[in-house]
Image (cartoon, grey):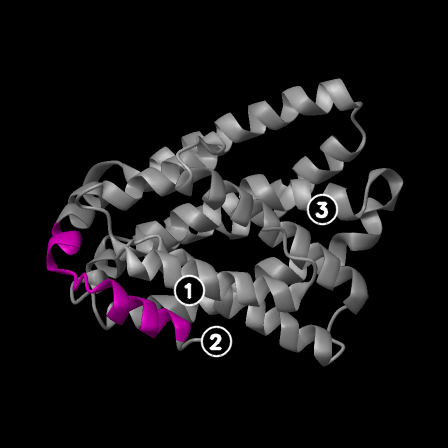
């Protein structure tokens, strides 16, 4: 289904969550975080927090529809973009932390989907006018990720090991997926907005491959961080419903 506005996005996310929870899928974790983000954006639109609330509604809807399309492709047995395929494949991967599931979804959605949604809503020379509201989506996501980490910490007793691995190692991977992604997503949108259709199609394929490589780094980080993930994942509670409820509560 293609949502037509942000209210329908929220409704579709609730249907997605019901379906994923029904099959006890860990993909519900990102969907729950996404619902929290969307509720915050909807409130922001209602409170006049964006430069153009009507455009933000269209932007958020176009953005969400890319996630829905990728997930629908998976659920009917197709193959979504590489960046999403790696995130979805982690559903069955043993030893993947709850936090990694969240970051894999964030990586695909911001690094791949966000620039494409931006140029759909503000094509060509109109793109610069979208910048402030473009960045606002990522700021909301960053704020909620802090709350999400607290929620995950309640069911992941050794998650604080990441804090002790020299210089907030967990924040290094969060920064990789969020802070750096904000500038990179805008850069990609700016480049794609000025390309001709054939050139843009090639650029999108290249972007998908690069975002997929970033996903692989989230799944298999180097050194002590990789060893810590193996330990942490073994001690996490993996009641899908309980974890999903904690993430839903941060909205």
- Say if the magenta span includes residue 241: yes
Q: Relative to the observer, which residue lies in front, 250 or 142?
A: 250
Identify residue for label 3: 118
Compared with 46, 219 (above or below) is above
Give the extent of the magenta segment.
Answer: 231-248
What x and y, as percent, mark residue 45?
71, 73
Tag 2–tag 1 contact (CB < 8 Å): no
Q: Residues within 10 Å of mark 2 (few under 14, many from 20)?
A: some
Q: Earlier in the sequence, mark 2 or mark 1?
A: 1
Tag 3–tag 1 contact (CB < 8 Å): no
Is 217 left, or right, of 153 in this rendering?
A: right
Identify residue for label 2: 251
Determine the CA span between mark 3 and mark 1: 23 Å
Element type at mark 3: helix
Q: Earlier in the sequence, mark 3 or mark 1?
A: 1
* Residue pictured at 22% horizontal, 59% vertical: 164
Quadrant in which residue 214 is drawn: top left
Q: Residues within 10 Å of mark 1 (few under 14, many from 20)?
A: many
* Residue pictured at 17% horizontal, 43% vertical: 94
* Residue pictured at 11% horizontal, 53% vertical: 234
Element type at mark 1: helix
- Say if the magenta span includes residue 99: no
Compared with 227, 49 (above or below) is below
Identify residue for label 1: 32
Quadrant in which residue 39 is drawn: bottom right
């Amino acid at each position: 289904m293609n949502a037509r506005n942000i209210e329908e996005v929220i409704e579709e996310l609730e249907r997605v969550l019901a379906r994923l929870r029904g099959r006890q899928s860990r993909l519900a974790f990102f969907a729950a975080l996404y619902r929290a983000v969307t509720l915050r954006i909807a409130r922001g639109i209602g409170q006049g927090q964006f430069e153009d609330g009507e455009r933000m509604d269209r932007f958020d809807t176009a953005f969400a529809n890319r996630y829905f399309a990728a997930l629908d492709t998976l659920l009917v047995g197709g193959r979504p973009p590489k960046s999403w395929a790696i995130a979805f494949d982690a559903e069955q991967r043993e030893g993947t932390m709850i936090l990694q599931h969240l970051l894999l979804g964030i990586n695909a959605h911001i690094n791949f989907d966000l620039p494409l949604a931006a140029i759909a809503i503000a094509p060509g020379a109109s793109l610069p006018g979208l910048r402030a509201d473009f960045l606002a989506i990522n700021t909301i996501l960053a704020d909620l990720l802090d709350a999400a980490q607290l929620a995950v910490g309640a069911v992941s007793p050794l998650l604080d090991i990441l804090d002790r691995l020299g210089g907030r190692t967990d924040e290094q991977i969060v920064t990789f997926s969020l802070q750096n992604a904000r500038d990179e997503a805008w850069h990609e949108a700016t480049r794609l907005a000025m390309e001709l259709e054939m050139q843009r199609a090639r650029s999108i394929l290249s972007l998908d491959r690069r975002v997929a490589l970033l996903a692989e780094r989230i799944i298999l980080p180097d050194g002590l961080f990789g060893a810590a993930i193996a330990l942490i994942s073994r001690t996490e509670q993996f009641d899908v419903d309980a974890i999903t409820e904690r993430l839903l509560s941060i909205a």
